[in-house]
Image (cartoon, rainbow, N blue to C red):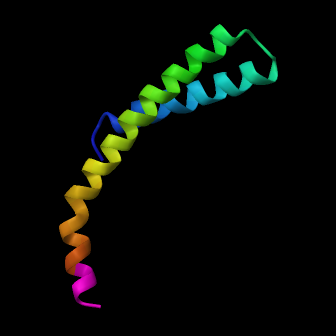
Amino acid sequence: MKPEFYPLSKQFNLALKQRNSSLKQKLAKKEISHWNLILQQTSEALHLLRELYFEEIKPVINTILSYM
């Protein structure tokens, strides 16, 4: 994984906890929207990093599978 994966993952988890807490507390939509935006941005970045990682390891996986 790329070095930026872990900080993004932490940011995503924090935003998720904050958003869920905001929902439970029935806070203003503006507050919830703020956390939703952060969740959207971080999840897209994490998805891209996961795709890149998979593309890096795909040749190794294919090699292993070819022996099965």
Q: Residue at x 34, y 48 (%)?
A: 50
Task: Name the image quarter holding residue 46.
Answer: top left
Q: Nearer the viewer, residue 27 or 17?
A: 27
**Is residue 23 found left or right of 64 in the rendered image?**
right
Q: Residue at x 61, y 30 (%)?
A: 16
Residue nearest the observer in this picture, 14 or 62: 62
For residue 37: magenta?
no
**Predominant secondary structure in magenta?**
helix
Instruction: Please state, as top left, top right, bottom left or bottom right, where the C terminus lies in the image.
Output: bottom left
> Residue 44 at x, y = what percent?
40, 35
Image x and y of residue 47, in percent: 38, 43
Residue bounds of the magenta highlight: 64-68
Q: Across the whole image, how many numbered discs are drawn on residues?
A: 0
- State the residue in front, 34 or 6: 34
In the depicted structure, whether residue 67 falls above or below residue 32: below
User: Horizontal and vertical percent for residue 3?
Assistant: 29, 37
Which residue does the image show at 21% across and 70% down from the upper left? 60
